[in-house]
Image (tube, rainbow, N blue to C red):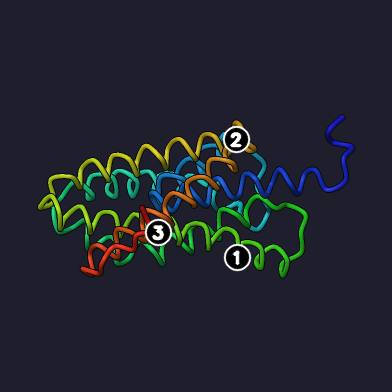
């Protein structure tokens, strides 16, 4: 019945794309691995221009990269080096995964949506957590970074699964995450720069 609603498939694709883009904001390679695994076993449809995501080489590569990325965030100093590259990488990954969910749109609208919605969501979340991690290092000497890293990994896994199993819920969670990251990420960057706290932020 829902399939008869005009543009319903586009809306669902957008929800899935937003969820996956949010997931790449937490971890770059874990969502790509989940999508690659799901498309490899034909659990989800894949745009013909993104069939490389369903290939065995991509599955193996993203699997190895996922493990390396997760472990690297538990190594002091290395986690901050990764943060400098994570934001542009998350933007690219978020855009790719968002675009991959639209099997019928033309190239221009597909990538316009992907860059704005997918890339923007991923970059915002990645940037916010980079600020939170930096503030954690400054206030806890790095002892709290493992908590931030674990939260990011759990968030990436949860959002990746929800995006495909319950896309509407994933989209709602993505919006909530964006709001929280913008608020707390902004406060973290302000604290890191040593600026005075605005009473309105309380």
Q: Which residue is mark 1?
A: 116
Residue in the image at 33% along x and 50% along y: 65
Q: Which mark is residue 169?
A: 2
The residue tagged with tag 2: helix, strand or loop? helix
- Taking depth in this image into account, of 157 and 173 the one nearest to the observer is 173
Q: Is residue 175 above or below residue 116?
A: above
Quadrant where the N terminus lies?
top right
Residue in the image at 61% along x and 61% along y: 114
- Taking depth in this image into account, of 29 and 144 the one nearest to the observer is 144
Q: Is residue 108 above or below residue 14?
A: below
Q: Position of residue 144 (x, y in %)?
A: 18, 45
The Cα atoms of the two marked residues, 2 and 3, are separated by 31 Å
The Cα atoms of the two marked residues, 1 and 2, are separated by 21 Å
Q: Which residue is mark 3?
A: 200
Asked if the residue under mark 3 is in contact with the one under mark 2, i.e. CB atoms within 8 Å, the reply is no
The residue tagged with tag 3: helix, strand or loop? helix
Residue 131, quarter of picture: bottom left
């Amino acid at each position: 019945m829902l399939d008869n609603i005009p543009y319903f498939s586009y809306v669902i694709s957008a929800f899935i794309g937003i969820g996956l883009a949010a997931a790449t904001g937490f971890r770059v390679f874990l969502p790509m691995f989940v999508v690659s695994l799901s498309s490899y076993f034909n659990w989800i449809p894949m745009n013909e221009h993104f069939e490389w995501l369903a290939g065995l080489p991509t599955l193996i590569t993203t699997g190895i990269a996922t493990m390396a990325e997760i472990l690297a965030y538990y190594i002091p100093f290395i986690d901050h080096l990764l943060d400098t590259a994570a934001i542009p990488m998350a933007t690219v990954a978020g855009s790719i995964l968002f675009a991959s969910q639209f099997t019928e749109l033309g190239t221009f609208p597909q990538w316009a949506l992907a860059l704005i919605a997918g890339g923007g969501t991923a970059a915002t979340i990645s940037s916010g957590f980079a600020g939170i991690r930096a503030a954690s290092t400054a206030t806890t000497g790095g002892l709290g970074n493992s908590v931030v890293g674990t939260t990011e990994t759990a968030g990436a896994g949860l959002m990746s699964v929800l995006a495909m199993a319950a896309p509407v819920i994933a989209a709602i969670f993505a919006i909530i995450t964006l709001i929280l990251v913008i608020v707390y990420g902004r406060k973290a960057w302000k604290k890191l720069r040593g600026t005075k706290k605005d009473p309105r932020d309380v």
